[in-house]
């Protein structure tokens, strides 16, 4: 399994994401924001951070970068999986690769915590705890979009104790083809027992399962 | 008679004469500007240097550099704390944000990757609207800047006291890691290029160093242009670019542009390297047109680094800067002239020796013990409060209550190294994957005690940090000190400062740890008052395995022990938080530390842990034995039944603060007792964690009520 970890100027979870992939046993390498092809990767990560400073709105500028053309291309070809975590999720929404947008948390503050979640894996629901760290994590979409998200079973991760005011408690979701994944919580920060627990490994397990099924 | 330039720049007559004598002529206009910045208190440390040399340095790595460090295996942990008090007082958001930016660069300049931030914050009481505004702005500034650059803010302290109303204190500590063979210093060498990488130089922050070297006043808000504006995005890419550049063999030295910007960085590097340096001011990349040489030299625009690069490495440096889209210019070269020469439009516009610039005057302070010390020591409290009311007062006091509202706004898990998070223990834990262990971090201060007794209070602050690390499982290795005082030209402040230095020095010697770095912030006063003398101590420790960390939680069915001193009717509890909160009282004698007992206690904690006899541990500080027990049962979400009062005065027994005490919990009380008795460790068995009430000495409290008071006190004050 080969993972590409996209690095925009201002990305700050690139090292954590690459480290988690490697700990999980995958090959992983950084992909600088001017890269134009991602074909060699089975999975592409858009890690957390503040791409290009996020001065306008989180993820707003990154969608214009060359590598996002490559991401679009990668998704169109259905080459592999794209996973956006935190800022990566924001970028995927701004790029219309995922529905909805991520707005300012309902308390208007940045929130860093370990939060309880329910994750759907193969039809089962598992309770896990993952770190969150974001100022703009409130998932918002139109009523029709929310309806479609539910009907097409696109939600895979829900907050048990909604910290930011996301509609429908949405913490993470797929696109319609189930090839693009976006999530606000940080599974890559929850892989080492030495730090913030190992619940994140369940996400990587799920991803590996998805990937294997996707390759068949 | 019209005001001369040097007078306008706050250079006194004696110093101006000294300048003339040193350079053998009248300085020209530009040179006068250079001296006004380099000989300011902020850069020149002229009132403190003589005394700072008393601090023990032995055992530290590169204590003369931007930051000092301690060695952990093949790596060095560099750390330093710095104040950004004055800017935060007039512009809290940018003041705090750029405070982080500045201290991060100090660690970065050594080639170390920043891995953690801590902060010590002091404000006026939350009942004061302006103080609340400053508090909110500072926390927001730290959150916005620290989170963006991807360095976790893992620990800190926040206090509220009327002494900080007009002069809030914002101290930030940065911690970085580098392999011992990859360290870069700031020592220049002859024959290299001077390359500036980072933001364009603008007019922001000019005179920041001089601004920080005077008292705040009604007019301070007019100094707002002296506050720099931060750009965390530029900082983040500058961190990455700097680490790549410093990995090049052709890069000889590095220094960040902090106070007095380009001037202090380049002249200091030349001075340390004992060489000359020419700067071509026309080549500096500028943000605005028409900037004059003195503006370019004194600008404190953020996010700029200076590299000394061997000519054959220039292309590599430029390529890295280009990759990150960061502006870079060759702005000069090091020479053998021994002079710091500035050129502008092909003319030599200033020429002075780097030594003279960097070796400003060193003053001897006039220390006179202020009268208040004797008076306050003799003061006593003659009021009492029913214990149920007293407990609620303490638990709901923003000084004691949970700071979750603050640290929830800081990203404390980015970097995936955080082994102990805020609220879990007396110290933060940062996993050092490179060596297998965990670095322990804490920052502490106690202005009340230092005000009452500058010597003992400062010493106690060292030991308070020490106990915070020990109770979390770490062996202390070294400190950084950030010394916040009033105007040193006043005898009272001079006394506080010198005694405090002596207390820190003796405390560190007794604890066997060096002072690796530090910062002095004077002039923290205004016509409305002066801050408590407040040395903030940032201490770093290490433990070789994450399995040996100790959390500050007491769990159901565990037995709780007290080891160390007991409060009796003769104990000195001067400076205790409870009395300040409940009675607005500050007085009495400060307890003296017993270093031999402290060592026995820390050894005991470690042995009990290593033999599986200890499960949770808390050092006893603010809020006394009650405070420690409360934090412990809150951490473990359990009740408690037992006894805490062993003297005639229940308030003193519960809330009094003395040195040399820990609480810990165990599942094997008999074995613990046997060990403590055999080793002559003073102890008391306090009770058992059980039920859903807090019960001691006939008093009983509902947990839900107290826990919710503790959790919500800060936030409910904020929204009031």
Image: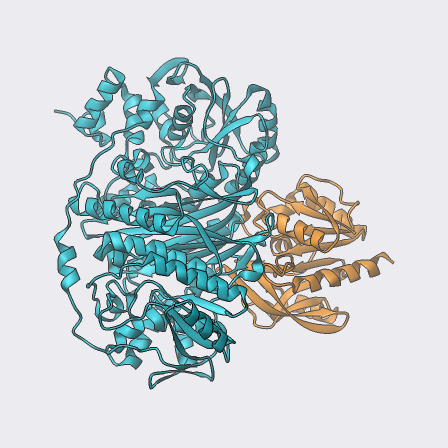
Chain colours: A orange, B cyan
Quadrant in which the C terminus of chain B is drawn? bottom left
- Rendered location of residue B458, percent (x, y): 29, 53
- Residue drawn at x 31%, y 50% as measured from the top left: B535
Report whether B571 appears left or right of B472. Answer: left
- Residue drawn at x 29%, y 71% as measured from the top left: B567
Q: Is residue B320 above or below residue B380?
A: above
- Residue drawn at x 40%, y 73% as measured from the top left: B629
- Rendered location of residue B664, percent (x, y): 44, 70
Question: Is there any visible trace of residue A49 in the rendered image?
Answer: yes
* Res A208 quadrant in image: bottom right
| Between B632 and B174, the one nearer to me in the picture | B632
Q: Residue furthest front?
A: B678
- Rendered location of residue A29, percent (x, y): 71, 45
- Residue drawn at x 53%, y 35% as measured from the top left: B183
| Between B39 and B577, the one nearer to me in the picture | B577
Report whether B85 appears left or right of B452. Answer: right
| Between A73 and B521, the one nearer to me in the picture | B521
Report whether B645 appears left or right of A1. Answer: left
Q: Residue furthest bottom?
A: B698
| Between B265 and B6, the one nearer to me in the picture | B265
Quadrant in which the N terminus of chain B is drawn? top left
* Res B74 quadrant in image: top right
- Rendered location of residue B322, percent (x, y): 59, 31
Tally the numbered discs.
0
Report whether B491 appears left or right of A53. Answer: left
Q: Is residue B660 above or below residue B279?
A: below
Question: Is there any visible trace of residue B92 in the rendered image?
Answer: no
């Amino acid at each position: 399994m080969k993972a590409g970890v996209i690095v925009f100027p201002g990305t700050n979870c690139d090292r954590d994401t690459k480290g988690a992939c490697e700990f999980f046993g995958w090959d992983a390498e950084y992909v600088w924001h001017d890269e134009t092809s991602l074909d060699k990767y089975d999975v592409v990560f858009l890690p957390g951070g503040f791409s290009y400073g996020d001065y306008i709105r989180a993820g707003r500028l990154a969608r214009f970068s060359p590598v996002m053309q490559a991401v679009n291309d990668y998704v169109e070809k259905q080459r592999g999986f794209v996973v956006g975590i935190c800022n990566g999720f924001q970028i995927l929404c701004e790029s219309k690769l995922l529905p909805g947008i991520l707005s300012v948390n309902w308390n208007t503050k940045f929130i860093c915590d370990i939060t309880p979640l329910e994750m759907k894996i193969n039809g089962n629901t598992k309770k896990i705890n993952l770190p969150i760290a974001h100022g703009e994590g409130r998932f918002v979409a139109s009523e029709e979009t929310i309806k479609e998200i539910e009907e097409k079973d696109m939600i895979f991760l829900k907050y048990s104790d909604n910290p930011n005011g996301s509609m429908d408690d949405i913490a993470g979701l797929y696109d319609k083809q189930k090839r693009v994944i976006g999530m606000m919580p940080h599974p890559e920060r929850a892989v080492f027992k030495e730090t913030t627990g190992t619940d994140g490994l369940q996400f990587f397990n799920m991803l590996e399962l998805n990937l294997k099924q996707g390759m068949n | 008679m019209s005001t001369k330039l040097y007078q306008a720049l706050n250079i006194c007559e004696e110093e101006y004469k000294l300048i003339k004598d040193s350079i053998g002529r009248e300085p020209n206009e530009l040179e006068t500007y250079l001296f006004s910045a380099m000989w300011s208190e902020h850069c020149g440390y002229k009132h403190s240097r003589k005394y700072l040399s008393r601090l023990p340095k032995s055992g530290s790595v590169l204590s003369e550099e931007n930051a000092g460090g301690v060695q952990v295996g093949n790596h060095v942990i560099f750390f330093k704390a710095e104040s950004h008090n004055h800017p935060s007082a007039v512009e809290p958001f940018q003041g705090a944000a750029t405070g982080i930016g500045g201290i991060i660069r100090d660690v970065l300049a050594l080639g170390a990757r920043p891995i953690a931030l801590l902060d010590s914050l002091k404000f006026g009481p939350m009942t004061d609207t302006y103080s609340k505004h400053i508090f909110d702005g500072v926390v927001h500034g730290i959150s916005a800047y620290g989170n963006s650059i991807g360095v976790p803010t893992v620990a800190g302290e926040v206090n509220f006291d009327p002494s900080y109303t007009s002069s809030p204190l914002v101290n930030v500590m940065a911690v970085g890691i580098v392999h011992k063979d990859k360290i870069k210093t700031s020592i220049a060498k002859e024959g290299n290029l001077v390359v500036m990488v980072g933001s364009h130089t603008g007019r922001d922050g000019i005179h920041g160093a001089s601004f920080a070297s005077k008292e705040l006043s009604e007019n301070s808000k007019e100094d707002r242009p002296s506050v720099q504006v931060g750009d965390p995005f530029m900082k983040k890419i500058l961190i990455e670019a700097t680490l790549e550049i410093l990995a090049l063999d052709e890069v000889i030295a590095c220094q960040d542009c902090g106070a007095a910007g380009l001037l202090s960085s380049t002249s200091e590097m030349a001075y340390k390297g004992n060489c000359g340096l020419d700067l071509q001011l026309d080549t500096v990349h500028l943000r605005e047109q028409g900037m004059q040489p003195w503006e370019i030299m004194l600008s404190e625009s953020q996010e700029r680094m200076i590299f000394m690069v061997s000519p054959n490495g220039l292309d590599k440096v430029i390529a890295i800067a280009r990759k990150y889209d960061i502006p870079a210019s060759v702005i000069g070269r090091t020479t053998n002239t021994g002079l710091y020469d500035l050129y502008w439009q092909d003319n030599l516009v200033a020429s002075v020796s780097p030594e003279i610039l960097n070796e400003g005057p060193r003053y001897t302070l006039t220390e006179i013990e202020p009268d208040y010390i004797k008076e306050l020591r003799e003061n006593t409290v003659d009021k009492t409060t029913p214990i149920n009311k007293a407990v609620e007062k303490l638990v709901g006091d923003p000084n004691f209550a949970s700071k979750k509202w603050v640290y929830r706004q800081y990203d404390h898990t980015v970097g995936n190294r955080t082994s102990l998070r805020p609220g879990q223990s007396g110290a933060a834990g940062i996993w050092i994957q490179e060596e297998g262990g965990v670095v322990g971090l804490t920052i502490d201060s106690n202005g009340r005690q230092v005000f009452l007794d500058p010597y003992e209070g400062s010493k106690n602050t060292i030991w308070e940090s020490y106990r915070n690390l020990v109770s979390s499982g770490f062996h202390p290795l070294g400190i950084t000190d950030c010394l916040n005082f009033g105007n040193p030209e006043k005898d009272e402040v001079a006394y506080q400062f010198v005694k405090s230095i002596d207390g820190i020095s003796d405390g560190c010697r007794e604890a066997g740890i060096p002072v690796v770095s530090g910062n002095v912030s004077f002039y923290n006063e205004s016509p409305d008052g002066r801050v408590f003398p407040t040395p903030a101590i940032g201490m770093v420790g290490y433990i070789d395995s994450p399995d040996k960390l100790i959390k500050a939680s007491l769990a159901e069915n565990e037995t709780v022990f007290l080891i160390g001193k007991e409060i009796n009717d003769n104990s000195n509890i001067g400076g205790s938080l409870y009395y300040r909160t409940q009675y607005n009282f500050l007085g009495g004698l400060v307890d003296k530390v017993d270093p031999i007992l402290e060592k026995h206690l820390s050894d005991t904690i470690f042995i009990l842990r290593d033999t599986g006899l200890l499960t949770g541990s808390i050092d006893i500080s603010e809020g006394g034995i009650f405070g420690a027990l409360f934090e412990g049962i809150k951490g473990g979400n359990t009740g408690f039944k037992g006894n805490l009062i062993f003297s005639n005065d229940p308030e003193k027994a519960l809330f009094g603060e003395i040195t040399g005490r820990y609480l810990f919990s165990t599942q094997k009380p008999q074995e613990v007792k046997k060990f403590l008795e055999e080793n002559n460790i003073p102890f008391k068995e306090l009770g058992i964690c059980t039920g859903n009430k807090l019960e001691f000495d006939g008093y009983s409290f509902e947990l839900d009520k107290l826990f919710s008071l503790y959790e919500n006190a800060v936030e409910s004050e904020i929204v009031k």
